[in-house]
Image: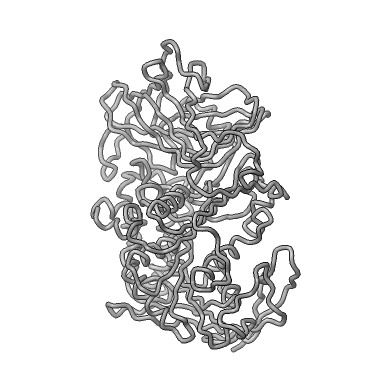
Amino acid sequence: MTGRIPSGRNDVDVFGPGKDESLSALHTHSGVVREGGPLHHGAESPRWPKGQRMDEIQIEFDVPAVMRDGAVLRADVYRPRDAGPWPVLLSRLPYGKGTPLAARMLDPVTAAKRGFIIVVQDTRGRFASDGDWEPWTYEENDGYDTVRWAAGLPGSNGSVGMYGASYFGNTQWMAALSKPPELKAIAPSITWSDPDDGLFSRGGAIELGITLPWSFLQGADTLMRRHRTDLARLQTSLIGLVQDLDGLAAEGYWELPAGRLSAFARHDIPELGYERSRREPDWARSCRIAGRHDEVDLPTFHIGGWYDIFCQGTLDNYVAMRRAGKSASLVVGPWVHTDWGHEVGDVNFGFGANPDLMGLRGRVIDMQLDWLRHQLGDADAGGPDAGRVLLFVMGINQWREETEWPLSRAVDTDFHLRSGGALTPESPGTDERPEEFVYAPADPVPTTGGAIFMSADFRPGPLDQTHVDSREDVLVFTTEPLVEDVEVTGRIRAVLFASTDGPSTDWVARLCDVDEDGVCLNVADGIVRVRSVPDEPAEHLVDLWSTSMVFRAGHRIRVQVTSSNFPRWDRNLNTGEPEQSATAMRVARQRIFHDAARPSRIVLPVVPPVDRHAVGETVLSEVR
């Protein structure tokens, strides 16, 4: 069987010539993809090996790889038609090797035309691969075995690099930690460092927003495999799963206890990992990179987004590798987890923010391919400097090149919470009365934008916070209009002196930008779950993660303080009972202190104003 499939965007310079073309002679098991015209690209086409053509590629589907325990995992393999030898790029994911998601991260046809063998593998227990589906459990060993297998494929030169995002960013780290000798470089995007800082939980609160929809979506393949010989039962089970997925906002997220959700048992599907990590604390090592970066002796290329659910993990991974003396590069855009476009939430950041333009630098995928080409042995490829950083600075909507993260020139600057809802650089000189509010778990503050990955009812990114600001259980502190631009680039934290009348509660802090028309947009937020002595003030640190944002002259900086952000994070029921069993709720009376002895504040890494071009800023990235 043969057919024609569209080639999509040619591998061309974003400002160079290109045309839509088609691919032909694609066979169901293996075949040839041939382009009608020459290959163009902003960088010179790979010449490794010399003199061989790469305008024809061969594709093989469901190529088996046998793991150490006998499980067979299957991959699709894309390779240049000529013999090579070629370096190998490997991606291992649980979402289906044929899913468009995999091609969005790095199009295998484009990469094969540039002189790579591309291997896209279904992880254990998923789609075409055998075995049982247990998130994270087998990725380190299976990663090692697959790298060694891929290095021995026909036409391989024995060098392997890895690429991918999120789960298949983590599979790269797990393979790297297993140290297969043929693995030479990894390029993880939008993935975490510590699963208890964005994946399973954050600040002690459950990442409920991602846990339920992710587990349900992966559960569909589990049910199809389980009931593939009983169509009636399969239909019933899938209908039930989809109903629960569709009902998350109205019902599923509200289910208690949040730490042991009945939906997973009801459908008999694996959950993301929070529950298992509490039952088996050592098991979380199967997806934890934090604390192990010294074991990875490879160059790394990191891509993140300021509104990505794993933003801080991406930054932490980069920082840890640089501190370990390893070569690492970093790109951070204004993006969310599933959309790297230039329109994010309620904001159009300008077409220059799009990953196909990158402030006139060309496509981010091509930057990644050039880097991989260099790391896998092409001395002519001119890879980026070891510490290269490319940041998108929001507010002015411009890309800027740096040589470090965090920026050493950023100055931690206190903005103090003050009476009357003021936010000032000056600390309280006299005693000020605390602010009070009531937190009722039955009526939590609704999640409104942010660095989230949730059901479709909840949009990520910067969203209008008007209805959040107006709630009685949200304290709002705002500066006067700024007389000049204020750049905040780096990690943000809030120091709250607070008390509650119960044994436990949560504190949530959010940084916002308010424009001249009063529109308030969220920039960054964080949560901390605390055990408390009732009515006794204590100091609490809330990690809001990192951003790069210029608050423009005439705008105001705002801080929201509250006790919930639901259903992104599970509700603290204010009883002190474990999340695995708590169902009873109590209303909590909260107090935030801001006096001379207890100066609650937000600490912003303020970058002193300099000549923007002196630090590599690209003003042309404002092109729309």
- At x 54%, y 88%, the residue is 83
Give residue 153's quadrant in the image.
bottom left
Which residue shows up at 48% across the image and 42% down it?
A: 546
User: Where on the picture, by quarter, is residue 219?
Assistant: bottom left
> Residue placed at 47% from the left, 82% from the top?
156
Q: Is residue 237 visible?
A: no
Quadrant occupied by the N terminus: bottom right
| Rendered location of residue 211, percent (x, y) | 40, 52
Question: Camera-side residue: 347 or 54?
Answer: 54
Taking depth in this image into account, of 59 and 186 the one nearest to the observer is 186
Number of residue marks:
0
Residue 615 at x, y percent in the picture: 61, 44
* 103 relative to 122 in the view: left or right: right
With respect to residue 208, does 119 lie above or below?
Answer: below
Q: Is residue 243 above or below residue 161?
A: above
Can residue 158 be seen?
yes
Task: Tell which of 427 and 108 is nearer to you.
Answer: 427
Give the colouring mode of the picture: one colour
Q: Is residue 504 left or right of residue 48?
A: left
**Is the residue 161 above or below the residue 505 in the image?**
below
- Residue 321, percent from left and from top: 41, 55
Residue 501: image location, x then y, percent: 31, 23
Find residue 148 and report its image quarter: bottom left
Task: Looking at the picture, tell me which residue is in the foreground, 126 or 367.
Answer: 367
Q: Residue at x 59, y 86 (%)?
A: 32
